[in-house]
Image (cartoon, helix red, strand yellow):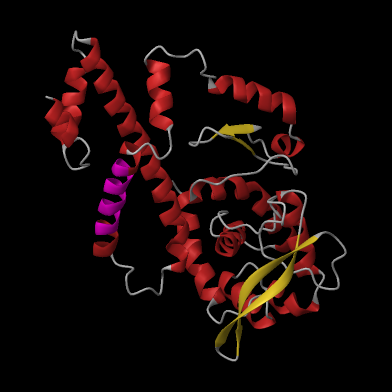
Amino acid sequence: MSNRIADAQNFLDVNGLNDIRLQSKADNSVEKGQALQQAAKQFESIFMQMLLKSMRSAQEVLESDSPFNSQSTKFYRDMHDQQMALELSNNGSLGLAELIVRQLGGDSENFTPKSVFKENAIKTYGDSEQARQFNMPKYRQNTDFSIMKLGESDTEARVQFNEPKDFVTALAEPAKLVEKKLKVPYQVVIAQAALETGWGQKIIEQPNGQSSHNLFNIKADRRWDGDKTMKETLEYEQGSMVKKREPFRVYKNMMESVNDYINFLSNSDRYKDALDKSSNVEHFLQGLQKAGYATDPNYAKKIMGTLSKVTSILNE
């Protein structure tokens, strides 16, 4: 049976997983221990598959023009990712399987339950005023077992988005504030932020590693007297992409970024035409592009592509 358990290292083999279940019921403690180890590795591989899937999803918006963006390519890519996840977990890359074995196997002397971390986090961060305002939970338990603080964040609390759905959920209520002020459909606001930040995975960081909370990649021009950070960026100039190092605005939290986005658009004559018919999605996005919000000639088109996924997630 041990050979069959080894077969579970191939994600296509279902019988190997069944043999793990059967061996877990054995009277022999050694066999039970082996089954537990294999089951823990399988769990770790599932977790790793979730991470890979999340990273792939974050890149989808950038793959619209890729010749490799086809269903058949994605099918084989997913097969590769699943097998790679199994092999990485078998090598103990994350160490999660070891923790599971120690906890379920009775060796919990040095094991700290996640509930303790949650209690300590609540004591550290306290109440979230923004969470109460938007009727959100103060904390969300993420798939990576870290505490994610929604609503108002500061230099100590980092908001993490493991998949596009996390990003859309967190931005839904703040984006509705933009809709209320500027009449821009909140789904479009989320889509623009998703495009700019790769669904929250690529929010610009400061040199100390802290997040800039800059959801819309607004640059720190002469009108900005707050904190800023330098970042290399690609700009389109005369049809070619040029790498530049530009200053970007830094905010204390996500809501400050949203409020500045409102002020940035409403206090500039450049975006007056876009805001004249802001409820018309195509008119608004084309207006942003013509006003020079971004140098990418396909900027409006890419936001429209992202918008379809945002709408799909909101309708789930």
Position of the N terminus, as image quadrant, is top left
User: Which of the 4 image quarters holds residue 278?
Assistant: bottom right
Image x and y of residue 145, in percent = 52, 32
The answer to whether one can see residue 205 in this image is yes
Residue 277 pos. (x, y %): 67, 73
Q: Is residue 314 visible?
A: no
Q: Residue 35: image x %, image y %? A: 24, 22
Whole-percent x and y of residue 98?
Answer: 40, 27
Is 77 in front, or is 131? 77
Residue found 38% across the figure and 29% down from its top: 97
User: Is 273 left, or right, of 115 in this rendering?
Assistant: right
Instruction: Choose between 42 and 143: the one closer to the eye.
Output: 42
Count of numbered circles on the image: 0
The residue under the point 40% across, 40% down is: 93
- Magenta span contains residue 217: no
Quick check: 141 left or right of 269? left
Location of residue 233 by image quarter: bottom right
Of the pair 240 and 110, the residue shown nearer to us: 110
Name the quadrant containing residue 115.
Answer: top right
What's the magenta bit mostly, secondary-structure-wise?
helix
Q: Give the magenta part as a residue range.
A: 76-87
User: Would you say residue 78 sits in the magenta stretch?
Assistant: yes
